[in-house]
Image (spheres, helix red, strand yellow):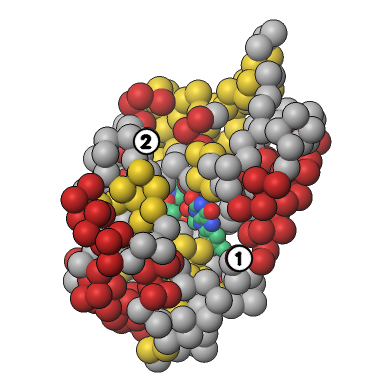
Amino acid sequence: MITNNVSLKSLHSFAIDVSARRLYVVDTEAELFAIWRHASTNSSPRIVLGGGSNVLFLENYSGTVLLNRIAGMTIEEDTDYWYLHVGAGEVWHDLVNACLEKNMPGLENLALIPGYVGSAPIQDIGAYGVEFQQFCEYVDVLQMETGTKHRMSVAECQFGYRDSIFKHNLREHYVIVAVGFRLIKAWSPILHYGDLVHLDAQQATPRQIYDIVCAMRRAKFPDPTHQGNAGSFFKNPIIDASAAEKLLNHYPDAPYYPQPGGEVKLAAGWLIDRCGLKGYRIGGAAVHDKQALVLVNFDQATGEDIAALARYVRMQVAERFAVWLEPEVRFISSYGEVDAVRVIA
Ligand SMILES: Cc1cc2nc3c(=O)[nH]c(=O)nc-3n(C[C@H](O)[C@H](O)[C@H](O)COP(=O)(O)OP(=O)(O)OC[C@H]3O[C@@H](n4cnc5c(N)ncnc54)[C@H](O)[C@@H]3O)c2cc1C
């Protein structure tokens, strides 16, 4: 399906009123490749989107948007694992539901994360002590210059905290078309975070975890269908041990999470909240009044409003804590993705 000069408002979770020159919904790899090639020969910018839940459009997009809807799921198993091959165009939460319904637990801590399966590897989605990479067996990508398909191993994907190779070297040339999962049959619950800590590890069921995770998320995040947002706007900053020691001497109540290499991860939401920024507004953009890590489209915000607010928040946090926040959200200009840190520096 093709549409010309189309509004993107309902196709990204910030719901900013921007448009794209062309929009295609693609259901097959062949279609994806053909449309990408056509846009390339016309020197038109092009971008693949899943659910648009991790992007900020700064202005109208002058090129072609391809909505990846390549569907399908196959399941195989051996004595120890289930192996799933899932199309990039499947909805992430539907996959979590389908796995639970088929008694294949593992993904329940990642319930209700918006977006599509093909986007999950890009920032190695994570929540409540679990990350996508723990279940990833491979990622299938289409090389967009040649149309050839490659299967990338977990090591090749270079997963890190809200990071992977797909955010860097491969960004311009590869599109994810399918993901392989490996779910262990000897399931054990992950109960380190939030209300999950109250469950008994011997008794907890995947369904209980799923229900609690869904309840926590509904309480924590504003629903994008009511108030546009992209979830956590900033990454939790990771700082070196000596900077962390200094900060924690001043603010002993600051939440912190020691990292394997000796560095320390801080809670970006706590830092923003401590600057007294909940509810702070610039234009139509606001810091959410209950969840400081979430910037919202409060009232017909433009992309520039959100970026200006992000800039202000970043500066306030830096002045108070000497910590520079980095956006988790991807910034899209008229011609394509731009460096989010540069935009708000
Ligand atoms: C309310 C809310 C809560 C959230 N909670 C979490 C959370 O707990 N944990 C978490 O990790 N994230 C969270 N997010 C962020 C978001 O849900 C994830 O990053 C998700 O994986 C994005 O999926 P998407 O399909 O919407 O991606 P999109 O926003 O459509 O795309 C994101 C980026 O990936 C690129 N892309 C998309 N599909 C492909 C493809 N097939 N191949 C190559 N590139 C592609 C796009 O060009 C874009 O740069 C939350 C977002 C919201 C709105």
Q: Furthest-bottom residue in view?
A: 283
Residue 265 appearing in the image: yes
Q: Amino acid at mark 2?
A: Phe
Q: Answer above or below: position of 215 versus 159.
A: below
Please tell me how crowded label 1 is: few (under 14), some (14-19), or many (20+) other residues with Cα within 10 Å. few
**Residue at disc 1, secondary structure:** helix
Residue 91 at x, y percent in the picture: 63, 48
Location of residue 225 in the rendering, given as x and y in whole percent from the top left corner: 64, 72
Sequence-first tag of 1 and 2: 2
Disc 2 target residue = 159
Residue 220 is tagged as: 1
Amino acid carrying label 1: it is Lys
The C terminus sits in image quarter: bottom left
Image point (66%, 58%), residue name: 216
Judged left or right of residue 4, residue 283 is left
| Residue 320 picture quarter | bottom left
